[in-house]
Each structure stands twice: as C-alpha cells, then as structure tokens.
Image (cartoon, rainbow, N blue to C red):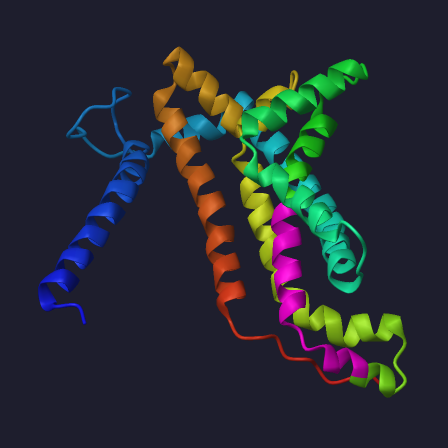
C-alpha cells in the first residue's frame, strides 16, 4: 500500500498540474475586465467597457453568427450520420466491419491541418467555392466521430433482451426504436451533440482551410492576435468561446457519467 508521503506528493502534484492548466485561463477572464488595453500585471483596475465595445463590433457579431450557424448545422448533420453509422456497425456483421469503424474514427485522430489541407484540395479540384457550406462539411468530418463513439458505446451497453422482449410482445421495429432504443440512448445522443457543437465552435485549423471569405470567432481571434490589435476585445471573445466550449463538455460528461437510462412506460 502507498505510504502517507506518496499520497501527499501525488495530491500536491495533481494540484500543481491543475494550476498550470487553469491559471492562464483565469488570467484571460481577468484581462477581459482590464481597464487598460495593455496586458500587464498587476492590472490597474476593472471595467466592463470592453464587453460593450466587443458587442458593438460588427466583425465580431458577424463572426459569432457564422460560428453558431456552422456549429449547429455540423452538429445536426453529424447527429444523423453518426447515429446511423453507430447503429449499422452495432447491428450488422460484415467483412471489414472493424476497418469501417476505424475509418469513422480516423478524422478525429488526424491532425486538423491534414484534414483541412485535404478538404481544401478536394474543393479546389472540384471548383467548389469556399463558403459556409464548406465549413459545415469540414466540421462534420470530425463531429461525426464524437456522435458515433457516444452512440456506439451506449448501444454496446444495452441489453439485447429488452429489444427481443418488446418484439415478442408485438412491437414492430419503429415502436421498438421509439419506446425502447431511443430512451436508452437519448443521453448518449444529447452528449454527443453537445460535444460535437463544442468541437465545432472553437475549431480554427479546419475552418481556416474551408472558410474562404467567411470568418468565425476562432479565425477572428487568430487574426487580431497576429496583428496585435484589439487585444482587450480578443480577451472578451476568448472568454466567451471558453465558456461556450466548457459548458457543453461539462453537461456531456454529466450525462454520460450517469446511470443507465430508464425505459419509460409503453405508450398506449
């Protein structure tokens, strides 16, 4: 068994790692309230003026709208395609099934710059103009993976006897899916959708290669940091992106960490 000294050392080490990870994020939030447009420590005071300045910036609002549209559309498409793929892999047996499953997961494992360059080459070869649609296609490639993994993991935990019992009682395939399967995988579907939206909302590398004239919040942040202007507004936008990313991830972790979903009473 571990002695007391080892346990104390591990706890201190864990705390140091957490501080290393989260102190920079805390500083970003703090600088968003800085009265000065120069990032120095200690900050001279606190103010809310940068929030109103950021909201009144047309470029920021335009980038926010594009980010929301791309994230929601990519999530909706990934939700349908990822769930269907998970059902197909789980319910059927065919030659090369594991290879197909690997191909679904591969886009998330590949560096974003490789996916972005490949998509940009495909669009250029086919003379497809870069737009919001190409951003959605690019984001969907890795959002599908999140939904697929969540739904497939929940399907593997399901008891096949529940479906067999429902069919023995006279339920057809639609009724089985509506009254048994869907309630059991609902939390996994919602968690997958939230994770997919979080990934899409803060994606910058794939977006850079598929956006064209479109600008999302991550691209706007990258551009302002590169030029070294509007840093206070950048801190405000970064704080907003962090919140929008963390909240869905936290909710998804809560949903997937809970117990198995209950099957509701059959509809009359």
Image height check: is 262 above or below 186?
below
The answer to if 157 sits in the magenta stretch is yes
- Percent across and percent down for residue 78 are 70, 46
Furthest residue toward bottom: 169
Furthest residue toward front: 95
| Residue shown at 85% from the left, 75% from the top | 175
The answer to if 230 sits in the magenta stretch is no
| Residue shown at 36% from the left, 14% from the top | 228
- Percent across and percent down for residue 193 are 63, 52
Give the main secondary structure of the magenta stretch. helix
Q: Is residue 62 visible?
A: no
- Percent across and percent down for residue 224 are 43, 17
Q: Is residue 85 visible?
A: yes
For the N terminus, which image quadrant?
Answer: bottom left
- Percent across and percent down for residue 98 are 69, 51
| Residue 253 shown left or right of residue 156 in the figure | left
Furthest residue toward top: 227
For the C terminus, which image quadrant?
Answer: bottom right
Q: Nearer the viewer, residue 77 or 3?
A: 3
Q: Nearer the viewer, residue 176 or 66?
A: 176
Q: Nearer the viewer, residue 71 or 18?
A: 18
Where residue 231 sits, quadrant-wise, is: top left
Give the mark count. 0
Q: Which residues are magenta?
A: 144-164
| Residue 48 shown left or right of residue 79 in the figure | left
Where residue 179 sits, quadrant-wise, is: bottom right
| Residue shown at 60% from the left, 33% from the top | 67
């Amino acid at each position: 068994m571990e002695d007391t000294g080892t346990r104390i050392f591990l706890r201190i080490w864990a705390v140091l790692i957490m501080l290393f990870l989260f102190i920079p994020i805390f500083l970003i939030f703090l600088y968003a309230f800085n009265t000065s447009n120069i990032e120095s420590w200690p900050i001279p005071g606190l103010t809310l003026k940068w929030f109103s300045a950021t909201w009144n910036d047309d470029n920021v609002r335009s980038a926010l709208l594009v980010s929301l549209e791309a994230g929601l559309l990519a999530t909706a498409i990934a939700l349908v395609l990822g769930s269907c793929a998970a059902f197909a892999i789980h319910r059927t047996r065919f030659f090369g099934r594991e290879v197909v499953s690997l191909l679904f997961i591969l886009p998330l494992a590949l560096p974003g710059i490789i996916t972005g360059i490949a998509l940009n080459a495909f669009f250029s070869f086919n003379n497809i103009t870069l737009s919001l649609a190409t951003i959605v296609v690019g984001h969907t490639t890795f959002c599908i993976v999140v939904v697929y993994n969540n739904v497939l993991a929940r399907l593997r935990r399901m008891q096949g006897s529940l479906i067999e019992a429902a069919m023995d009682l006279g339920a057809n395939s639609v009724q089985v899916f509506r009254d048994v399967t869907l309630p059991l995988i609902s939390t996994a579907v919602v968690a997958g959708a939230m994770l997919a939206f979080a990934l899409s909302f803060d994606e910058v590398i794939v977006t850079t290669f598929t956006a064209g004239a479109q600008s999302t919040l991550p691209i706007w942040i990258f551009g302002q940091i590169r030029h070294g202007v509007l840093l206070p507004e950048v801190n405000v936008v970064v704080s907003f992106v962090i919140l929008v990313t963390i909240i869905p991830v936290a909710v998804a972790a809560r949903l997937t960490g809970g117990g198995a979903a209950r099957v509701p009473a059959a509809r009359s």
